[in-house]
Image (spheres, grey):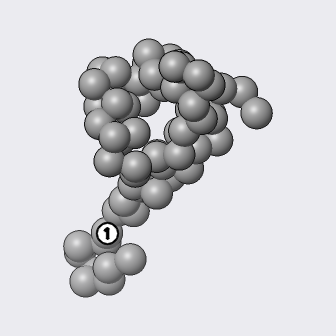
Amino acid sequence: MPLLTVEQAAERMCTKPRFIRRLIAERRIPYVKLGAHVRIDVRDIDAFIAAGRVTPTDVASGVFS
């Protein structure tokens, strides 16, 4: 279970650490507390990204996924 720092998680998601901290504060992403340090499992980052995936629609045929 590879654990990332907030900064590493932000880099993996191509965002700023502030966004990761907000996800943690809002309990929208699981994290591990090691004393004063916060770490995020790589699998949880990947799951969060996958959960936000939007599939394209085929507008021409009128079929929506």
Q: Split into 4 quadrants, where in the image is the C terminus?
A: bottom left
Q: Quadrant of residue 23?
A: top left
- Can you give x and y, in whole percent of width and height, for residue 20 in the image? 37, 31
- Can you give x and y, in whole percent of width and height, for residue 55 in the image? 39, 62
- Can you give x and y, in whole percent of width and height, for residue 2 in the image? 72, 27
Going by the image, does 26 lie left or right of 8? left
Going by the image, does 24 lie left or right of 4? left
Which residue is drawn at the image coordinates 34% and 30% (left, top)?
21
List the single residue furthest toward the front: 35
Foreground pick, 34 / 55: 34
Tag 1: Cα neighbours inside 10 Å, few (<14), some, or many (≥20)? few
Foreground pick, 57 / 50: 50
Q: Is residue 60 above or below residue 53?
A: below
Q: Is residue 63 above or below residue 45?
A: below
- Can you give x and y, in whole percent of width and height, for residue 11 in the image? 44, 19
Residue 34: tell me if it is visible: yes
Q: Is residue 59 above or below residue 28?
A: below
Which residue, given by chain and number where applicable, does mark 1 sit on? 57
Foreground pick, 40 / 54: 40
Number of callouts: 1
Which residue is drawn at the image coordinates 32% and 83% (left, top)?
63
Q: Quadrant of residue 32?
A: top right
Which residue is drawn at the image coordinates 28% and 25% (left, top)?
18
Residue 14: tell me if it is visible: no
Going by the image, does 62 lie left or right of 48? left
Which residue is drawn at the image coordinates 37% and 59% (left, top)?
54
Q: Look at label 1 and name its amino acid.
A: Thr
Q: Quadrant of residue 62?
A: bottom left
Q: Split into 4 quadrants, where in the image is the N terminus?
A: top right
Dot 1 falls on a residue whose secondary structure is: loop
